[in-house]
Amino acid sequence: MATNSQQSLSSIPPQYDIKPFSSCIDRTQHIADYFGPLGEQALSVYWTKKAEAITRYMEGSKRSDQLRELQGQKDDVHDLLL
């Protein structure tokens, strides 16, 4: 028999289910859709923190490759949200 939490998880309306987003470049891209300007600010902070982590913990060509890939992801997400 399903518990209350299992029942509530199985009854999530399709428009609020995040499973369709799991195959996207980055799951954070739908934040702005749900939260508007606050979501855009959250995305901005996310990209900044991710870039800082890459800069801090990677070196040389791997760092530049990761930063270039991150910029590409950021551009893709921005294009999706327009």
Image (tube, rainbow, N blue to C red):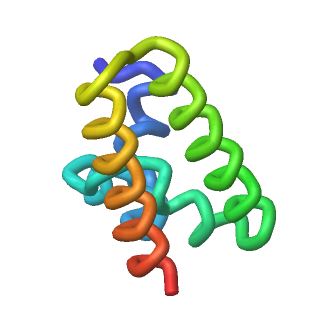
Instruction: List x then y, in percent, for residue 6.
Output: 40, 27
Q: Number of callouts in the render?
A: 0
Instruction: Please tell me which residue lies in front, 56 or 43.
Output: 56
Which residue reaches farthest bottom?
82
Residue at 51% from the left image edge and 25% from the top image edge: 55
Residue at 35% from the left image edge and 57% from the top image edge: 73
Instruction: Please tell me which residue lies in front, 69 or 21.
Output: 69
Instruction: List x then y, in percent, for residue 9.
Output: 43, 38
Residue at 36% from the left image edge and 17% from the top image edge: 59
Left/right placement of residue 61 relative to residue 80 reads left
Above or below, 65 against 3 in this view is below
Query: Which quadrant holds the N terminus?
Result: top left
Instruction: Please tell me which residue lies in front, 80 or 36.
Output: 80
Which residue reaches farthest front?
60
Which residue reaches farthest top?
57
Instruction: List x then y, in percent, for residue 75.
Output: 41, 68
- Quarter of image, res 15: bottom left
Instruction: Please tell me which residue lies in front, 24 or 70.
Output: 70
